Image (tube, rainbow, N blue to C red):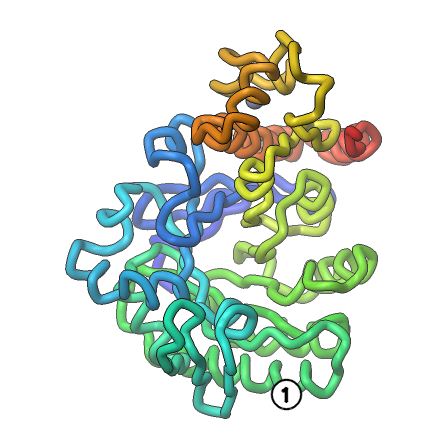
Amino acid sequence: MTARFAYTIKSRDGCARAGVFHTPHGDLLTPLFAPVGTQATVKSLTPAQLEELNAGLILANTYHLYLRPGDEIIAQIGGLHTFMHWNRPILTDSGGFQVFSLADSCKIDPDGVTFKSHIDGSIHRITPEKSIAIQENLGADIIMAFDECGSPYDLDKNTAALERTHAWAERCVKAKTRSDQALFGIIQGGVYPELRQRSAEYLSSLDLPGYAIGGLSVGETKKETLSMLELMDRNLPEEKPRYLMGVGSPEDLIMGVQRGIDIFDCVLPTRLARHHAAITRSGRLNITNTRYHSEKSPIDESCSCYTCRNFSSAYIRHLVLAKEMLGATLLTIHNLSVLLSLVNDIRQAIIDGRFDRFASDFLESWENIP
Ligand SMILES: [Zn+2]
């Protein structure tokens, strides 16, 4: 690990941590929430709008960008930062999750995965070495080891997937050539504590600059997710950042931070915005509801985002019903602002030593608005 990817924990409050993760494109303050930019764009927003929201880290998707436009084209244009005009840190996933969930007729063997593109049916093969080569072409600050995500309740499949994930992580470490990218390992193991523990121990022995927890929030119960996170908190190295993949509703952020998680990403705020839903600190609301048809007040009076400072609920409802693009943009700005300001408040509460109180107050007032 190079010093440029050092992680410094500034404050602790119970298991919650507030830290700074250094990357070549700037320091990331944790806990943090990363908006998802699957196709090298956070849907409906410009990079300038994301900067105004003070987003620190953006996630882009290896599988999608490898298939279209192709990682070599992105490398020729100067890498992902230049391509999407985002000069702050970027994380790319390994492509594993999408190969297993999106591609047609995917076949796994010990060496890698062969699959058909979901776009045009063409045949492709990704190995750990290929995943690293693609991610080196894309040039993100944080890259992920190629992994296999098993279904949460199948012990035999999870055991086999875990062994492959470990062998592949080691091959990713060997294949990596760039020193300006931090390679994170991904802990798998479904809902099985002994597998999760084995995975944490094995990947920790590789001394990587950070660790991701994969294969959660894929169908298991909330209680099982939380008990896995508690187990990870006890088994992962203290001084490395922990990234919970694909999880990021407001209550999940609170409960993850309570169990020692530092980094989250989720499509939820951007996807909900495209489905006319706004997230507030007390729950979700659907802007198409008739109760908003002549509502002068903003979506959330306690929010200071661009959308809530300037627009009535009635206007946003009108845009959405008229299928105007600005409707999704304004809702996305608001939803991301809620999550990004929530992680900032969480961070401050940890630094002030009042996170427990903050978390219980938040969870008490959190409910879904009908
Ligand atoms: Zn707002």
Front-lying residue, 98 or 304: 98
Image quarter in which the C terminus is found: top right
Element assignment for label 1: helix
Taking the image as four quarters, which one is ligand 1 found in?
A: top right
Q: Position of residue 158 (x, y in %)?
A: 68, 81
Amino acid at the residue labelled 1: Ala
Q: Position of residue 99 (x, y in %)?
A: 49, 73
Q: In this image, 321 relative to 193: left or right?
A: left
Q: Nearer the viewer, residue 300 or 145?
A: 300
Residue lying at the far front of the rendered structure: 322
Q: Position of residue 247 (x, y in %)?
A: 63, 52
Tell me the residue at 59%/45% (across/down). Answer: 268
Residue 165 in view: yes
Q: Is residue 147 left or right of residue 195?
A: left
Q: Badge 1, how many Cα within 10 Å: few under 14, some, many 20+?
A: few
In this rendered view, identify the residue nearer to me: 270 or 123.
123
Q: Position of residue 27 (x, y in %)?
A: 39, 42
Indicate the quadrant where residue 281 lies: top right
Q: Which quarter of the picture shows residue 177? A: bottom left
The residue wearing badge 1 is 160
Answer above or below: position of 41 versus 299: below
From this viewpoint, which residue is outermost toward the bottom? 110
**Residue under the image location 49 percent in, 43 percent down:** 35
Task: Residue at 52%, 69% (x, y): give it.
Answer: 102
Residue at horizontal 54 percent and vertical 45 percent from the top = 9
Relative side of 151 to 180, left or right: right
